[in-house]
Image (tube, helix red, strand yellow):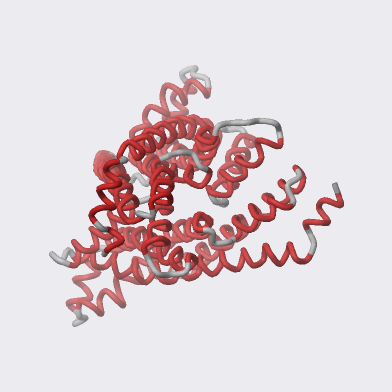
Amino acid sequence: MIEELAVLAQWHNVRFMAEGLWITLRISVLTIVFSFILGTLLGVMRYTNHWLLARVAAVYIEGFRASPLILLILLFRFTMPLKPVNSGTLAMTLFTAAIVGEIVRGGLNSVDKGQWEAARSQGFTWWQTMRYIVLPQALRKMIPPLTGQFITVVKDTSYVWVTGVQELTGKGVIILGKHGSTIQFFAIFGMIGLIYYVLCLAINRIGLWQENRMSWLTH
Amino acid sequence: MDRFAAFKWQALFKDWHILLEGLGRTASTAGLALLLALALGVLFGVLATAPWRSGRSVSRLYVSLIQNTPLVTQVFFLYYALPHFDIMLPTPVVGVLGLGVYHGAYVTEVVRAGIQAIHRGQLEAALSQGFSYVQAMRYVILPQAAQIVLPPMTNQAVALIKNSSILAMISGGDLMFQADSWSASTGYYGPAYLTVWAIYFAICFPLAQVARRWEERVRLSRGGEVTAA
């Protein structure tokens, strides 16, 4: 039993898993950053009630939200001239942006309309009011659902394995092909599960910390 | 746009029964998994608000372990773990178990929030009238919580239907798998995936709209104070 675990702990196996973790992290970070930007844009567009902008955002959001992520990953993989890891990241970004868009809209709606009137009466333009008054207050309300969604992003990176991208879960399944005894199986999956768990908990902590840090905004 | 050429669509519609079989598998898997998720969710949701500390801990452990690891990893874990104990299950059953346990953790949170939204006085009143804790839950608290819980529960059902596409990763024969294997053999990916997208949209979009409308109604009927997320 000890030998079986020692085989697993060999340097080339550890490095193999670390490469998977690196890919998982890279897809996660890129998806989180770009979906936050695109999602904020979509949320503001839908919030404006502008006849064209709001409709474009609504069609985008509902279209992407109703699809399984795995379908988008496969669709992009086979209809775009990109490397699988990039088409997968793109699919995840566009999908997550739709959900972030709804979170942003909800956050904006929760800001009292009086804030608009007050800012506009002080000579702020529409854009300045949005940028300096409304969005910062909305952001604080958005942090708990955003934290939840970004945890989902880290978990969802495992779907990209469907196109053969060797992220953390994929690496684990591959190693399992060589070292598949019962004890090794539990060690591998226990390790993978623990890594995801720690990553998710870290995001959760960052979310709580940000929420505290911004508490002055709504006091 | 020859990725979406007309003859490819024709080939797809000639083989329409393949997608229909997949849709049937998706429906049965999602339906059974939803039942399992509801059962687990009510059980652990009630435990989460129970007066016994061990019950609350068990519930918290379940929710945090399941919610902080990916569904894909959990399903692969089940898929590879069962044979180690000489348990051979058909892949759709593995899918039902994986999906049910995963969404059960989310339903647990929904049920817990629903129970906590009911005023504590309701429970005390029931207990003072001689109800046992389980009876008070069964006849007083849960029926009231059900109304609050309905919209987020519908959202869970939508998420579960979408996530049932996980079966495609373990050759479970669902809609996504059928489209994937059909297009792998023909090379016509575009039409197959777009059609499957349209089917998922036709199921998920109306359900999400219904949930949104219910949510609004519950908020209005309870004076705008309820947040059972």
- Residue furthest out toward the top: B130
Residue A117 in the image: state x and y as whole percent: 19, 71
Vertical order, B93 against A61 (above or below): above
Residue B153 in the image: state x and y as whole percent: 38, 39
Q: Quadrant of residue B213?
A: top left
For image coordinates 29% across by 61% down, the residue present is A105
For image coordinates 31% across by 61% down, the residue present is B3
- Residue furthest out toward the left: A51
Vertical order, A52 against A200 (above or below): below
**Of residues B10 and A164, the one drawn nearer to the viewer in this rendering:** B10
Tag count in the figure? Answer: 0
- Is residue B216 visible in the rendered image? The answer is no
Residue A169 in the image: state x and y as whole percent: 60, 55
Left or right, A144 with reference to A115: right
Q: Quadrant of residue A204?
A: bottom right
**Of residues B181 and B158, the one drawn nearer to the viewer in this rendering:** B181
Which quadrant would the N terminus of chain B be assigned to in this image? bottom left
For image coordinates 21% across by 81% down, the residue present is A124
For image coordinates 27% across by 43% down, the residue present is B13
- Is residue A182 visible in the rendered image? The answer is yes
Left or right, B24 with reference to B83: left
Left or right, A49 with reference to A208: left
**Of residues B99 and A171, the one drawn nearer to the viewer in this rendering:** A171
Residue A217 in the image: state x and y as whole percent: 39, 70
Vertical order, A173 against B228 (above or below): below
